[in-house]
Amino acid sequence: MKFLFIQKGSFPATGPMIISALLKEHGFEVDLLLDGEEKNLLKSIRRAKPTIIGIPCLTGLHDWATDLCQKIKQELPETITLLGGPHPTYYPEIINEPGVDIIARGEAEYAILELMQKLRDSREIYGIKNLWLKRGNEVIQNEMDFLPANLDELPLPDRQIYYKYDFLRKVSVKQFLTGRGCPFQCTFCANNILRKIYCGKGKFLRRRSPQGVIAEIAEVKKGYGLKTVSFTDDVFITDKQWLAEFLPIYKEKIGLPFMCNVTANLLTEEIIRLLKNNCCYGIAMGIESGVQEIRFKVLKKYITDEQIFSSAKLAKKYGLVLKTYNIICLPGETVADALKTLELNAKIKSDFAACSLLQPFPEYDITEYAKANKFLPADYGIKDTQGKIYQGSPIITGEIREFANLQKLFFLGVKMPFLIPLIKKMIKLPPNFIFNFLGKSIYGFYMSKVHRLTLSDMANYALHIDPYDV
């Protein structure tokens, strides 16, 4: 029996890699196709002859996913279609779309293994936790299982399903997760929905053992030309004791430069010294808004200006690259407020200031806030989402053109603060291809520097990946 993943974007995702490893451990065949890399996707699917086709589904790509399911059912009516990932987890009503047979919600590795085993053994499949399934005209909605408590019981991710594509295998910077969950409750983050879905179902914030993480990185270093590590945990520094155990082992066994995500309220000189002394070359932290009142009231991100300036000062003191995340076009935010975000990033000398336009997905706390305060229509729903965080925002404001232009010119102002007075005038112009070109080219150039991409990496990204998708 064969499980076939089909993915729209090109970046390797941890979920499919772990599911693949788990299924292979139990004797199943697994493969993956990247939509953008296949000349004829349906032909490649027919050639693969899968029992189940699993489609990782992000909000913004959900229409693509359901359209693909319908095409698959027309071509291969006996093949089971399954949607997994964030979108069906948060918006399970997608099960009602034609062509969709099953959705997997949340951390569903063991659910998919159980599904494959029961199909193989011709047993009843309709009671598997984390899955919603169609049975005739009925939809079976199973409850969520408990969160996996011991992440080390899961196998190491099977990266080969992605690395069969040369451009992914050859990229020198690769991403790793050391745990799951986040301790904070920012209104713009999906973790809040996930926390509610799993209420009473186990500990939300979990960490793999240092030895397990090291084993994964060592395997990739040995076989896939790894030169730089990127830890993509929401917050890498939540557990100081874990860091103190992990980092010296990392330095001894791996010894490669790495970057990680931090938060300014947790970053101390002791932690940053520990990072610096054990191969860390850069940190990334969320600023989101340069106006503390907006961070507190709208974003529920309780980080003060003082903590931001202190963390940035520490990064510079220890010679670490500083990457920042920012969001503009927030509910109730003015362009003047957004310019303060730009100015704050310039003051702390951010080496790479990523800036996006708010995409308020349904059920997010910030979306409910925006609807309650009439910054979104009362009936705003999934059909209204735009998906792309660099191409617009549905937030109701009389300054949407200025916000869209500022997003394109944001990083230019951070790197060249003397241009800010000019940028304030430029954003009043109609959107144009020059702003788009400047935004993408500057973003791509500094992204490559901060993430230490080689010339080969940059060539691969240029051919296969939009820099705004990184």
Image (tube, helix red, strand yellow):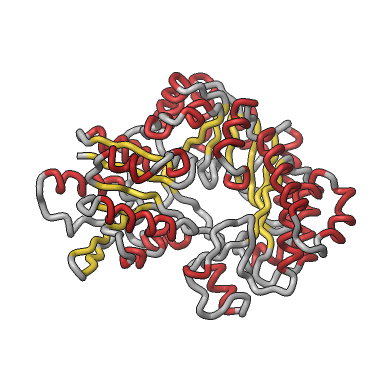
Closer to the camera in the image, 272 or 113: 113
Closer to the camera in the image, 165 or 348: 165
Residue 230, quarter of the rendered image: top right
Residue 128, quarter of the rendered image: bottom left
Question: Residue 236: horizontal and vertical position, in percent?
Answer: 54, 41
> What residue is at 23 percent from the left and 63 percent from the top?
134
Q: Is residue 273 visible to us here? A: no
Q: Is residue 267 visible to us here? A: yes
Question: Residue 454: horizontal and vertical position, in percent?
Answer: 63, 26
Closer to the camera in the image, 46 or 90: 46
> What residue is at 52 percent from the left and 32 percent from the top?
174
Number of marks: 0
Q: Relative to residue 139, is residue 17 depicted above or below?
A: above
Q: Quadrant of the C terminus?
A: top right
Determine whether, in the image, residue 329 is placed left or right of residue 417: left
Q: Residue furthest left?
A: 122
Question: Residue 247: horizontal and vertical position, in percent?
Answer: 53, 29
> What residue is at 89 percent from the left and 48 percent from the top?
418
Determine whether, in the image, residue 262 is placed left or right of residue 166: right
Determine whether, in the image, residue 269 is placed left or right of residue 239: right
Question: Residue 430: horizontal and vertical position, in percent?
Answer: 78, 63
> What residue is at 52 percent from the left and 41 percent from the top?
232
Q: Quadrant of the N terminus?
A: top left
